[in-house]
Structures are given as structure tokens and as C-alpha cells.
Amino acid sequence: MNDKAHKIAYAVFALAVILLGWQVDNQYYLQLMIFIGLNTLLALSLNMLMGYAGQISLGHAAFYGIGAYVTAILTTTYQVAPVLALPAAVGTAMLVAWIVGIPTLRLSGYYLGMGTLGFGMIVHIVLREWSSVTGGASGFVGIPPLEIGLVVFASGKNYFFLVWAVVLLCLIMCRRIIDSRVGRALRSIHDGEKAAAAVGVDTKKLKLQVFVFSAGMAALAGFLYAHLVYFISPGTFSFVASIRIVTMVVIGGMASIWGALLGASLLTLLPEWLHAFSEFEMVVYGLILMGVMIFLPRGLTRGVLDVYERYRKNHDR
Amino acid sequence: MLLSRKCRFGALAIAILLAGALIFTPGVFAESHQDAYKIGGIFSVTGPASFLGDPEKKSMELAIEEINAAGGVDGRMLEPVIYDTEGDPSKTVMAVGKLINKDRVTAIIGPSRTPTTLAVTPMVKRAKLPFISCAAGNKIVDPVKPWVFKTAQSDVQAVASIYEHIQQRDIQKVGIITVSNSFGESGKEQLLAQAGDFGITVVSSQSFGASDTDMTAQLTKIRQEKPGAIICWGTNPGPAVVAKNAKQLGIEIPLYQSHGVASPKFIDLAGDAAEGIFLPTGKILVADLLADDDPQKQVLTDYINAYESKYNETVSGFGGYAYDAVHLLARAMEGTNGDKAKIRKNLETLKNYVGISGVFNFSKTDHNGLDPSAFVMVKIKDGKWELVE
């Protein structure tokens, strides 16, 4: 896509968000869209790592959890203002990612998957067992609402705008990284790490940087989650959650900014729509995911474009 | 101007969105009244806690059927709207949002687990909606929250009845082994907190993962401290492994289990090793052994018969939480015309309701309404439950 197309896409996106926010009054739909926003952030953060740099992470929920728990502990136990807790939450996750990233990112393929999987489990166990600080398995209660200056972000509507403003900000940020020299270097790592190194890309440093960046974004989502629900428990940040994020990226389309949005929306909305099937809900859910992967193996975004291109080719002939 | 046009455009869009965030303040919705009262239900019907959620869902449907057959509440029928939480807090938040804002229910029953309950209590508080949880954790009603009630017995009462029994047998030192999830943790908290009141010292406190298959190491550590009894706190299958390992290690001191394993499945899992184990349980497990003058006997027998004939499966000890919740709610709804504040007030003042899990006496300071008499001590003998006094 060229520059103009991007601008149009952002405009359409922003307009859609504003219109939805204006028109929708039902708290349930607002809540649903807020969750889509949070999941988009998560999928986007993992997409930078997985889709562009080609580094798989099966422990991404750990950073989501770190973000949520750091702000919960600071704002509730130590009464720190949420605005100040935000840099702490994001910073902690980035620091942890940096420390963990140095040894783990030497791995590749399955081994990297295993390494990050183990990391995710360790964080989950720490959250669950360190009960004097984290509240343990029963969870952390009493997180205050988000207050910035005089504004309290408590209602569905203003939280909706906050979350989606953050999503748009992150979308633009990611887009700009990808279009930059760094972005091209990242994609070269994805295509062939040795080749990238041979042409002078500092692969080690870049991989670490994108890992840290990705962790920060996931922590941001965690921060927003904690102040939305006012309660967190380790279950939300378990291995299953990590897998769900990977699924969003794969279903939406790897190496695509809008794929993250699409994947997150589909995986958040699908279970809600499928309530009608009651007992068969999980079966239908599984079948749909399978169908997408069989017929559109490159994810929804690429897949739809492929189908369109094929159609046009046939038509032109 | 150094900023590129694209950048400026992005900044503008973000500014507009943030402005939107500032303009909107909490909205208020009009109440809608239909002919039938909608009652929300949220249970972990699937997932790791399905052994709780599945019988709870069925019992809720059963109770609503009974009430409707008897003419409903003030002539208006009850209509259940039930969602599956899969035991996941985020899913529960979503489901409660849907119940409150889309289905516009009058009250909500469930969820089955403590973390999922705690995740939604801020929401019901904001929505001012009567809410009866089916989870065990004491954190739910301590401190008391105006709109939150619960029907499951708390670990407070279970621990008290175990310690009472241990005290009677003149044992002063105990070792505890608890599962590392919300159930075990809440139990451990109570075990440590109440020990002093009964003159008991906890000499060793160990934990195990919910899906661990060998607890020999923890039991060996406990044995080194020479306690007079071991108390295990968990839900199946872990405690069965503890029982087996204790037998293999030749540990002779009495083993106590929590009400979390109070189902025939525990005896199946532990086999021989279950012999001689003590545990507190709600009366439902031993309904046929109760004395005829027990106030709960009639209620229990009716519920068991109705459940077993409707669903063609053995009743579990957990469905009663939802069954009690529906009946309590229906009682509190009488004469309120669906006014949520009145329902809440009625629930808080409800006294002497004989239910499945015990005799409920709610008050301003007690939103669980049960006392230790909700539990009876049983011993496993020849693969069957036996009442102990």
C-alpha cells in the first residue's frame, strides 16, 4: 500500500470509531468493542514480533500480565496515581523482556517457541504463588478506575474512546516502524537471518529491540485491562491466553497491521455470536477456525486479497 | 513545519478520539419491564470447573421450572438466561455485561468460581443489581458488599468443623497440604487463621499443583514435623493422589480432606486409600443418613429426586448452590414488582430459609447466612460415607 492508501485507511478507521462511539449507547456493545481494542493491541504487538521479525512467542500473555499486575500493585497497594503507574508498568515489562530476550532470542524455530513458552509459565506461576503481593490464585481486587487529571475513565463510552485512540496511535506507530529502515531490516530477518546478517543487519540487536517494543505494547494492553475490569487474576494471563493471541495473529494475517485488527475482532466476536449454538458452540468455533486456515492459509487479510486477485485475473482473461 | 502530513493527520485523529473520551460521561438507562422476569445465570459449564458449572446450570433450570409450575412470582414467570464462563474472568465480565445491558435481567446467579465472581462484583455494584454467587471463597462476602450474596458454604465453616473434630480428639499439631488455586489458597488462609482459636499449631504447610500426580515429597516433609493429623485442601483429582501417597508412605495419622472432594468420584479415584478419611460435607451427600427430624431432610430428598428423574444422572454436591440461589431470589422478589433495591433489601432480611446447603439467615453483616451446622463430618468406611459425631 502506498502513502495515500494508508492515510485513507486511517481516516476510514478513525471515522468508524468515532461514529460507533457516537451512535452506540448500549454498554454491552461498548464493552465488546473495548475488548476488541485490547485484543487488537495484543495481536498487533505479537504481529510485530512474529509477523514481521519472524520470531515466535508462546508466552506473550506474560507481558500482558506484567503490565496489569504492576499497575494493580502500584495503584492499589501503594496508592500511586495511574498516570505514574503507566510508565512503570510498560517499563517493567520492557525491562523483563530485555533481560529474558538476551538468552532466549539466541534460539530459533521450535526452540524459541519452547523458551518463550517456559517464560510465560514461570510468570504465570509467580503471579499465582506470590500471594502476599499479587493476591494469588483468587486474584487482585479493588483496582481503582483510571484517572488522568480531572477526568475519570469509568463509563463505557469514554473508555471506548481512550482504548481506540491508543489502538490508532499504536497502529500508526507500527506502520511507521515497518516502513522505516528498521522495518525493512526486520523483514529481512524474517526471510533469512543469515542473509540479513550478511548484508550488514545487526540481527541480534534488532530482534531484541522488537521483542522489547512488543512487550511494552502488550503491557500497555494489560494496563488498560486492569483499569477496565478493576480485578485481575492469573487465569487471564495463562498459557491459553498466549495461544489465543497467536491465533489472532495467524487468523488475521501475519505481517499485516490490519490483520491484527481483523483477527482480534473475529476471535472476540465469534464466541458472542455463537452463543446461539449453545452446546455446539465450541464445535462451530473450531470448525470456523479450521475453515479459515484451510482455505485462507495466509490469514484473513492476505487471504481475502488473494481471492480478489485471483478473481480479477480470471475475469480479465 | 517539520512534521510530515501523515503525522499531522494521525495526531489530529488521535486528538479527536481523545476529545470523544473526555466528552462522554456515564450514561443512565431506563428500566424496561417485560411480562416475565429475566434471571441471569453465569456458570463455568465447560472448562476446568465444569464439575461445578454443569450441575449448577441444570439445578437453576430445575428450580425455575418448579417456581413457574407453582405459578411464578406474583403470577409472573421466571425466564432463565444462562451463559457459559468457561471459568475465565474476561469471559465472565463479557457475559455479565451482556446480561445487564442487553438482556436486562432482574438479578444474576453465579458464577461458579471465586476469581470469576470477584471479577464481576464491581459491575453489579455499578449496575445496582442483586447478585448471588455460587462460589466458595470467603473473599466474596468479606467485606460485605451491598449487592453481593452467596449460597455456597464458606471455607470458614468447613475449617471450623474440621478443627472442632481435631480438637475433640486431642490433637494439637497438624500439617496442611493445599492446592495452589483459589480454592486451596482460601482454605489455607482459613486453616492458618483459625488454628489458634482451637489451640492447634500448623507445623508444616505444603502446596501442590492442581494437576500434579505425585505428592510424596510434600508428605515426607510434613511427616518430618511429626503432626498429629494431616489436612488436605483441594478439589479432585489432587487430594486422591495425596490419599494414595499417604498410604504408600505408611502414614498412620488421620487424614482430613476438605468439602471440595465431597463427591463419590473421590472414593472412585482414591480407592482403598480413601478408607478412614474424614471430611466435612454439605448434608446433600448423606441425605439418606440424616435423622428424620433434621429440618433439611425433606428439602434434600425432594431436590435429589427431582434432579435425578429430570436429568437421569446422580446428583452432585454443587448444583444445590444454584438451586438455593434461585429459590432465595424468588422468595425475595415476591411483592417487589421487580424493583431491584427492594429485592436486595428482602434478601438481606431473609431468615430461616431451609435450603440444600443449610439453613440461611441473612443479615446486614452476613451475606452468606450459613453457620458451621451447614456441614456434617463424615468418614469413609467400606467405600461409603458414614456420619461421625
Image (spheres, grey):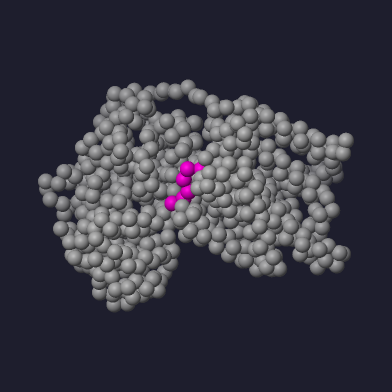
User: In percent of the image, x 60 and y 31: which residue is there?
Assistant: A150
Vertical placement of residue B342 versus A147, above or below:
above
Task: Please identify the quarter of the rendering in which residue A63 is found.
Answer: bottom right
Q: Nearer the viewer, residue B350 or A184?
A: B350
Q: Nearer the viewer, residue B179 or A17?
A: B179
- The total number of labels drawn is 0
- Residue lying at 72% horizontally and 35% vertically, measured from the top left: B14
Q: Residue at x 47, y 60 (%)?
A: A129
User: Horizontally, is A91 left or right of B336 in the view?
Assistant: right
Task: Tell me where residue B338 appears, x and y as whole percent.
Answer: 36, 25
Q: Is residue B245 visible?
A: no
Magenta span main SS? loop
State the extent of the magenta-drawn residues as a range: A138-143
Specify the quadrant that holds the C terminus of chain B. bottom left
Does the rendering let one see residue A124? yes
| Location of residue A128 in the rendering, given as x and y in whole percent from the top left corner | 48, 57
Residue A28 part of the magenta segment: no
Question: Which image quadrant: the N terminus of chain B?
Answer: top right
Residue A208 position within the rendered picture, expressed as x and y whole percent measured from the top left: 72, 60
